[in-house]
Image: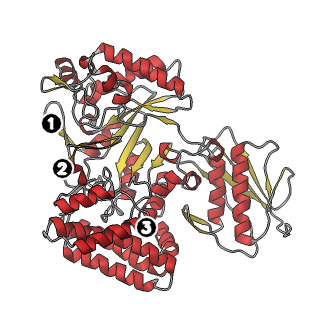
Amino acid sequence: MKTQTSIITILIPKDAPEQVSYAAKELCHYLSLMSGEIFETTETQKDNQISLSLDSKLGNDEFIITSERFKVNIKGGKRGVIYGVYELLEALGCRFFTATSELIPYKEKIILPELNTHQKPVFEYRDLNYHEATKYSRFAVKCRLNGQHCNIREKHGGHMGYTWFVHSFQNMIDPDIYGEDHPEYFALYNGERVTRRNVNQLCLTNPDVLELAIENVRKVLLENPETRIISISQNDWAKSCECPACRASDLKEGSASGTLLKFVNAIAERLEPEFPEVIFDTLAYNYTRPIPTSGTKARHNVCVRLCSIEACFSHSFESCDQDRSVILPDGSRSDFITDLHNWGSVCDRVYIWDYTTCFSHYPAPHPNWNALQPNMQAFANNNVKGVFEQACGASAGSTDFNELREYIISKLLWDPWTDVQKHIREFTDFYYGNAAPYVREYISYICKVAEDENIHVGFQDDLSTPLFRKEVLDTLQGFIDKAKEAVNSDPIRLHRIGKAELSVRWVRLKRGAMVDNSLNIEEANKFFTDWKSYGLTRIDEWCSPETTYRALLHGLWRGTEFYFYPSDEGDEEL
């Protein structure tokens, strides 16, 4: 049996909190992988030692690393002390690229680095729903995420408990329960109270609706004591109630967001004494995106989550010249960057819901690489406190270098001014090996086409755009071919490039059917066979791959065209 020969020891307090114990185990594990030595914890102070401890004066995500002679001290909050360990390991050359792909350098002798840093994230809430972080919560800790989708256990630092998450009106006042007897609780459209799930809102000026909402929100908070954020937000349907009272309120407030904000404020005020730690979260989404101009502001325990769903994602929010504004009650318009600037003046806790893929065609090359950092910096510069980056929500992820995008976005959520190009180089060099230069050329090229030709890309465009014309697809395929040749004798990297190639194959196949009226059935069958062989599932956010294939045969852009509305339980057929 190998005995401990390293002179480095790991100091933790007696009866250390579970987060400190976990951080110490992680440190021992990775130092052992790097050196082949056995590392263990101790409660005795020695030279050449790494000490770990919680510090109640630091925030949950904050940490301080100091170096003295032959010693490194890491102290932090319950997540911060774990982050501090990963910071030290990264200083020693480790990289945690994906849950299953880590760079652990061999070192014949580990020498403790001189490291003095005090770090806390720009954003208090950092969340995304890329496949690996949601499936592997311990990887999410390495990405320094703390949001709803990662579901990190308390011993690993925990996460911000979120109840209902979003589009919660139908959870708060269920139309299946109240719709028949109390249609007046629900929004009026074209003279009719609409009570069908998914396509209704609430009548926010009805006082009975407020009282029932308070009762039901209180009930769910009592049932979920771990809740730190609860969503009081409109359903995913872009209409405000048209009853005379709601219409008058929207006009008086200058935006439907004012009517919504008064409703959420009232709930937050009534329930604050009983739930003082809870944040009451709502949306600035579609018709509620612009701020109220009446002077209505969010209470201190209310969070407004601004959504960029109408925006162009091939250009930064601040540089894009395309009009994607929303209409105000008086008929005027407001664009996203203006709304971003404005919300900080009426809300002390602004969160962001941003979009990082094409939701109608997950595999499609999404040219947002050059916009990710300036957009994150725009959030930080406008006092945003939290960001959720919505990605491909398929159970096994997708293509389009999503592993790299997840890694880069995680780095930006921690530090919007990080060196993105350095992170891209390090990731691609390791993950794609000798194919890395061609992967980087592929990414650079698709972004350059969009930028040079001022092609605007939305969150669920079809594939008829000039961005995907034959010349562009041929060039992308050329990079893929060179990448495959470069790793022909490296089965793991070759497999990864084959997965990336599915993006070009899908766009070519779909455009052939829809634009050129020429569907190659043999190629279609081969594509779906290969797609499945990589363990991949949905191509479209709302459809199974079988439904997507059926749409291909029927000459439809999306499988959702078979259904009147994609529900939470599955597709509802017409």
How busy is the neighbourhood of tag 2: few (under 14 within 10 Å), some, or many (20 plus)?
few
How busy is the neighbourhood of tag 3: few (under 14 within 10 Å), some, or many (20 plus)?
some
| Residue identified by numbered label 3 | 534
Return the disc, 3 or 2, that comes first in the chain's sequence.
2
Which label is found at residue 323? 2
Residue 504 in view (yes/no): no
The answer for how far apart the CA atoms under marks 3 and 2 are is 39 Å
| Residue identified by numbered label 1 | 332
Which image quadrant is residue 452 in? Answer: bottom left
The answer for how far apart the CA atoms under marks 1 and 2 are is 13 Å
Residue 77 in view (yes/no): yes
Where is residue 456 shown, x and y percent of the image?
22, 59
Q: Who's the residue at 25% across and 78% down the image?
A: 474
The secondary element bearing badge 2 is classed as loop
Judge by depth and name the residue closer to the eye, 554 or 567. 554
Judge by depth and name the residue closer to the eye, 357 or 443. 357
The label nearer to you, 3 versus 2, is 3
The secondary element bearing badge 1 is classed as loop
